[in-house]
Image (cartoon, grey):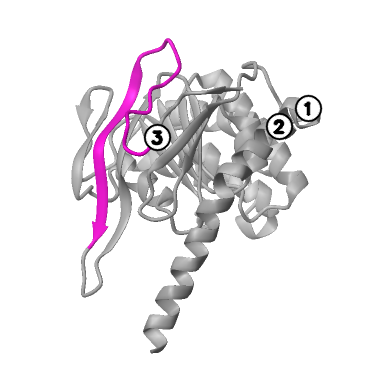
Amino acid sequence: MMRDGASGSAPVMTGQDRGAHAVLRGVTRVYPGAMAVHALGPIDLDIGHGEFLAVVGPSGCGKSTLLDVLAGLNPPTEGTITFEDKPVHGTVPDGVGVVFQEDASFPWLTVHDNVAFGLRRAGVDATEIERRVTYAIGFMGLKDFTKAYPAQLSGGMRQRVCIARTLVMQPRLILLDEPFGALDQQTRLLMGDELLRLWRETNATVMLITHALDEAAMLSDRVGVMSARPGCFIDVLTTGWPRDRDSRIVADSAFGTLTGKLWSLLRGESLKAIGSREGLTQSAGA
């Protein structure tokens, strides 16, 4: 593994020879109120074309806020964000797909109609909808469940439906916020294999937010490590894995070294975050 040498608000370069697909410069997010919360930044980040970037950090450090501002779901307080050289503000840009941890499938729709939902709203031709939906359902291993409803599926299968619904929109940048957080360890590893296969086949750029260090280490080209709130990048590690990797890489001795390095970086920040939350609780109870 290699270290990119990013620290604080210094630019986090891609470490790739692909050019920047998404760029954040001087991005902060402060939630206003009687007790304003400085949640994020300043952040400088370049995400390369076709890169798989994972972001880890202690609870409450602003990881999800980072994803939200990049997706256009939450405006930054300061700084600029561009995707494909166009500014991001107000709405999710064309070409960006978002998958959240929560089961976002519609319980009253079948698997087929869940996956087709976004295409129908976008007014895509019915023949093209059927082509894309059939492909996505097959790709995600759901062909035998086309007419099933979410209540009839396992948690992992429902998450496959959500990923398929994003896949059919043909995003060039896929943002994932703890998509496998509710799944057991074995299912998470296998879902990770599916995600890597999707990434390779579509050549999309991917940013994954996760608490799981093994997930970040297995899936990504680079892992960005964030500090306690306000979240900034304290380090970025390049994993050095081959592009055709899968979950078997967890048996590699370098995998243990990488996850150990991630924990050594995060342990102190996690303790800070816990101390900060305890301090806020004590102040509220005083």
Q: CB under 8 Å between callouts 1 and 2?
A: yes
Percent x, y for residue 213?
63, 43
Q: Quadrant of residue 2?
A: top right
Task: Pick the quarter of the image with the C terminus.
Answer: bottom left
Residue 285 located within the stretch drawn in magenta: no
The picture quadrant where one finds residue 5 is: top left
Q: Residues within 10 Å of mark 2 (few under 14, many from 20)?
A: few
Establish if 228 lies above or below 168.
below
Q: Which residue is mark 3?
A: 7
Q: Position of residue 285 (x, y in %)?
A: 41, 88
* Amino acid type, label 2: Thr
Q: Is residue 12 left or right of residue 56?
A: left
Q: In the rendered image of this protein, does residue 284 appear above or below residue 23?
A: below
Residue ID for mark 2: 257
In this orientation, does residue 105 appear? no
Distance from disc 1 to disc 2, alpha carbons, whole Å, reads 7 Å
Residue 252 pos. (x, y %): 78, 26
- Identify the residue at the far top of this view: 17
Residue at horizontal 36 percent and vertical 34 percent from the top = 96
**Which quarter of the rendered picture does the N terminus lie within?**
top right
Confirm or deny contact between disc 2 and disc 3 (CB under 8 A): no
Neighbour class for label 1 at 10 Å: few (<14), some, many (≥20)? few
Vertical placement of residue 202 versus 9, above or below: above
Q: Give the residue at x 45% y 31%.
A: 129
Query: Looking at the picture, which amino acid does disc 1 mark?
Result: Ser
Which badge, 2 or 3, is on the more N-terminal residue?
3
Residue 253, numbered circle:
1
Label 1: state its secondary structure: helix
Residue 15 lies in the magenta-colored region: yes
Q: Earlier in the sequence, mark 1 or mark 3?
A: 3
Q: Which residues are magenta?
A: 7-31
The disc placed on residue 167 is none
